[in-house]
Amino acid sequence: MKLPYAEPYRIKMVEPIRLSTRSDRERWIHDAKYNLFMLRSDQVFIDLLTDSGTGAMSDRQWSSMMLGDESYAGASSYFNMKHAIRDILGFDYFLPTHQGRAAENVLFSTIVHKGDIIPGNSHFDTTKGHIEFRHAYAPDCTIDAAADTQLELPFKGEMDLNKLEKILSETPRERIPCVVLTVTNNTAGGQPVSMKNIRETSALCHKYGIPLLLDSARFAENAYFIKTREEGYADVSIKDIVREMFSYADIMTMSSKKDAIVNMGGFVAFKSEELWRRCQVFCIMNEGYITYGGMSGRDMNALAQGLDEGTEFDTLDARIRQVAYLGSKLDEYGIPYQRPAGGHAIFVDAKQILRHVPKEQFVAQTLGIELYLEGGVRGVEIGAILADRDPDTRENRYPKLELLRLAIPRRTYTNNHMDVVAAALANVKERADQIAKGFRITHELPVMRHFTVELERIP
């Protein structure tokens, strides 16, 4: 008999989570102005809002934190992080920051100017926010197939090279500071990008003399999909795949709270010493000295260890198996999601469930609130609220996809928790025909509004 699969770790510490009643949740979400971000953590039973900084660190990571060097300048922890970035990712120059959006801020403060165009494959919210805040533009060059949630493709997050070349050929070189390739493509449903597409995107960028930036929060999960889905890589190690991926990039930003499995931390890394030096001023002004940025020594140590562990096959395999497990449970209930299951989350197709809610009433947000009321499960809307307003017309943007992202923290929940999530969604689906109205905005910020937006029910 073939032995069943078991996770390659054992649990050493547990943290209690709170059960609640539906009446509790109705009161709490009302008080939170129907913004799932505004809930207290103890008002949530299963928290799938994000996988960013919410995973369980390993014993080696916790041990390395105890050895953190908190010297202001030149700490040994900085050099541990430097060596990990050089040896695993292949970058000689980097600046530590407190998280990924800070890395974007340091970089874009240096290279992005008013009127610039930064094409990419579905820029994530903070990336697009930093670009548009500087009165620049972020055109989406993702392949069209990503908009069909039921289409099964092994690499559904890829850059459409024809779309990209049209922009590169029609735009003056000086107006394109870089091209952004996000791996995996979060906004399109956590979908990966093939090595072939990374290589060809790099070649196209360099044909026009434009740097390629890899947005790398989930680069290791992308490497896993290359190994398991792309011809020629089955016998290649994750670390070797990672080195090849980054050999095609000129710059990388990383929120290390994902694939490096730390609670806080990030960095921007460069092949160019000259650009590294130019960015230092914004690191010092906004984050801290260049050998700690926005990080403590203990967090730099944990990040360095996490980069090593996070690029091991068994760690990735256990993590991605759990995402696939939740997908299989949703299949049993006939719940549509962006297929195939992504690397870090399941993205439920809200428009296919809440067919009667108008797009102007924020379909994915409505589904997220209904799921919270049903089972105390918190997800996050990847739809019209996150898409924000057009920077020129100030009209709401309505993307092709209205998704409810259920991001699974690493090594945090069991498959029993996934069963609860699936059953709660199934209950919402059963009464979906009774849900015909959503929400309207009563307060919003001009950029990245979804974090603090306030809503009210439409009666």
Image (cartoon, rainbow, N blue to C red):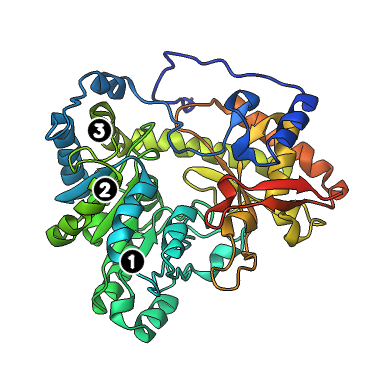
Counting residues from the N terminus, which is met first, the one under dot 3 or under dot 2? Answer: 2
Residue kind at label 3, given as amino acid type: Met
Residue kind at label 1, given as amino acid type: Val
Q: Residue at x 20, y 37 (%)?
A: 81
Residue kind at label 2, given as amino acid type: Met
Would you say 99 lies left or right of 80 here? Answer: right
Residue to which mark 1 is pinned: 112
The disc at residue 285 is 2
Considering only vertical position in the picture, is 368 above or below 171?
above
The disc at residue 76 is none
Of discs 3 and 2, which sits in the foreground? 2
- Give the quarter of the image for residue 288: top left
Of discs 2 and 1, which sits in the foreground? 2
Of discs 1 and 3, which sits in the foreground? 1
Point out residue 430 in the picture as x, y percentages from the top left corner. Answer: 82, 42
Counting residues from the N terminus, which is met first, the one under dot 2 or under dot 1? Answer: 1
Report crowding for label 2: few under 14, some 14 to 19, many 20 or more residues within 10 A (C-alpha): few
Residue to which mark 3 is pinned: 300
Depth check, front residue: 224 or 236: 224
Report crowding for label 1: few under 14, some 14 to 19, many 20 or more residues within 10 A (C-alpha): many
The residues tagged by marks 2 and 1 sit, at their Cα atoms, a distance apart of 17 Å
Considering only vertical position in the picture, is 165 above or below 330?
below
Counting residues from the N terminus, which is met first, the one under dot 1 or under dot 3? Answer: 1
The residues tagged by marks 1 and 3 sit, at their Cα atoms, a distance apart of 28 Å
Labelled pair 3, 2 in contact (Cβ < 8 Å):
no
Q: Residue at x 51, y 48 (%)?
A: 342
The residues tagged by marks 3 and 2 sit, at their Cα atoms, a distance apart of 20 Å
- Give the quarter of the image for residue 114: bottom left
Q: Residue at x 18, y 56 (%)?
A: 276
Considering only vertical position in the picture, is 15 above or below 101?
above
Q: Residue furthest bottom?
A: 170
